[in-house]
Image (cartoon, grey):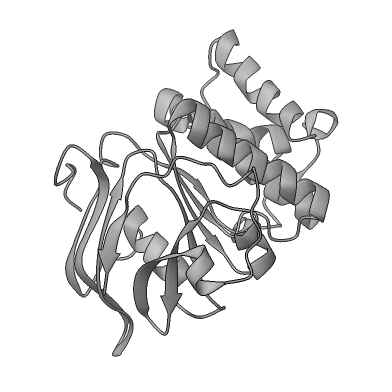
Amino acid sequence: MTPTTSNKDAIITCRNVSIAYGRQEVIHDVSLEIPRGSFLPFVGPNGAGKTTLLRAILGLIRPRRGEIITPFGTSPPGYVPQHRTIDPLYPVSVRQIAAMGLYPKLGWWRRGPKKLRLTVQKALEEFGLGDHANKIFSELSGGMKQKAMLARAFVSGADVFIMDEPTSQLDEKSEKEVFAHLLRLNRDEGKTVLMAVHGMHEVLELPARICLVEHGRVRLAETSDVFPARPASPGNTANDNSVKGGR
């Protein structure tokens, strides 16, 4: 990936990107410009290509064609994969999972200054994990595992957060808490948030602009056009930067 953006507004640019697994092309000719400070849910059914496209933006998958331009070479993103990507047999504590977000600052397993250790503890407490910091990750429920992964991303201080269904395995109360954290980061701190979501109820609680992924095709849309019954909500006021894109 090229380590610079194409213009001063776009923090991520996809130019005619196609992605394949072997001979099967799963993402077809995607072009997107995502401005700094956007809040952009990637919406679509399972298997549509949401995770594949986000992993390509992260640099974990090389496109078959086209280019993806990001600043991640010098400013790594905060990434929240689905918690199932952590080996349940690896004996790592909840605190250690969260502290992994400090890797860009400290390197693996180095003991950081007190301020950074407090940053980890604060993130754990904000997600209701303060009393579980010394537990082994594999001992947690699915929802608490996901919260630990979110805490890891938040302590990184990244400018871009990329999240793969970050509220999977969460109950309704925890889901709303997570979305509140994401919206606060976007509105109050100007963070760019990209996230794959699956359920329609999740989309209805989020800002009006979405990235719709269907059968490997990608387009930007207004939520009201895709889900006409979307109710008005005072919560749908996140940063409304213009996102350009299409197939």
Residue at 64% from the left image edge and 45% from the top image edge: 179
Between 53 and 213, the residue placed more toward the observer is: 213
Q: Percent position (x, y) of residue 57?
A: 33, 57
Residue 26 in view in this figure: yes
Above or below for 153 versus 51 = above
Between 13 and 68, the residue placed more toward the observer is: 13
Q: Percent position (x, y) of residue 140?
A: 81, 49
Q: Quadrant of the C terminus?
A: bottom left
145 relative position to 171: left or right: left
Q: Percent position (x, y) of residue 185?
A: 53, 33
247 relative position to 163: left or right: left
Residue at 51% from the left image edge and 27% from the top image edge: 188
Residue at 62% from the left image edge and 55% from the top image edge: 86
172 relative position to 37: left or right: right
Between 5 and 85, the residue placed more toward the observer is: 5
Residue 100 in view in this figure: no
Q: Percent position (x, y) of residue 211?
A: 42, 64
Residue at 46% from the left image edge and 32% from the top image edge: 103
